[in-house]
């Protein structure tokens, strides 16, 4: 997400001069950042509504709105509980592209399980 927010600076001139091109490029950057096209479209609709409703011409406000929309989706996306098997072992499949923090997330999960008295392999 940080990369996406940073890339917004590079396309900002298009926001000032050519809005359609800005929104198209922002959507492309979101998809490149591994946000699905459906989710990117949903986020963009919310951000566009805010920008046009409030007549926003400030990059920081656009960034803030984009960040808030992404956070809302991440917070509200279904049940966040981990399903632990009643019969060990419980196996988790962790997927993602290179450099997104899979190993770090696994280490944090392992630490949490150990603190809760679970055995980690």
Image (cartoon, rainbow, N blue to C red):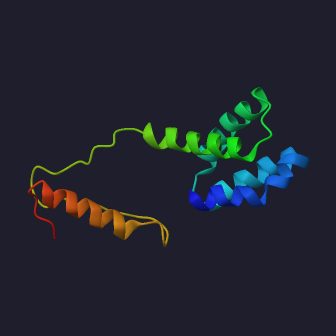
Q: Residue furthest top?
A: 53
Q: Quadrant of the C terminus?
A: bottom left
Horizontal relation, residue 42 to residue 118: left or right: right
Total of numbered circles in the picture?
Answer: 0
Horizontal relation, residue 7 to residue 34: left or right: right
For the point 73% across and 36% down, the residue is 48
Q: Is residue 31 visible?
A: no
Q: Is residue 61 visible?
A: yes
Q: Residue furthest right?
A: 17
For the point 76% across and 26% down, the residue is 53
Residue 106 in the image, given as x and y percentages of width and height: 30, 65
Q: Quadrant of residue 6?
A: bottom right
Q: Quadrant of the N terminus?
A: bottom right
Residue 11 in the image, given as x and y percentages of width and height: 79, 57
- Taking depth in this image into account, of 58 and 88 the one nearest to the observer is 58
Q: Quadrant of residue 94?
A: bottom left
Residue 64 in the image, given as x and y percentages of width and height: 63, 43
For the point 58% across and 39% down, the residue is 69
Horizontal relation, residue 5 to residue 19: left or right: left
């Amino acid at each position: 997400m940080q990369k996406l927010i940073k890339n917004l600076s590079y396309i900002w001139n298009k926001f000032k001069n050519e809005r359609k091109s800005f929104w198209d490029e922002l959507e492309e950057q979101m998809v490149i950042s591994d946000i699905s096209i459906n989710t990117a479209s949903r986020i963009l609709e919310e951000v566009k509504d805010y920008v046009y409703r409030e007549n926003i011409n400030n990059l920081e406000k656009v960034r803030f709105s984009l960040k808030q929309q992404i956070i809302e989706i991440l917070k509200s996306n279904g049940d966040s509980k981990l399903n632990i098997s009643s019969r060990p072992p419980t196996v988790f499949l962790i997927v993602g592209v290179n450099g997104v923090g899979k190993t770090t997330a696994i280490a944090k999960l392992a630490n949490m399980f150990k603190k809760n008295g679970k055995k980690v392999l």
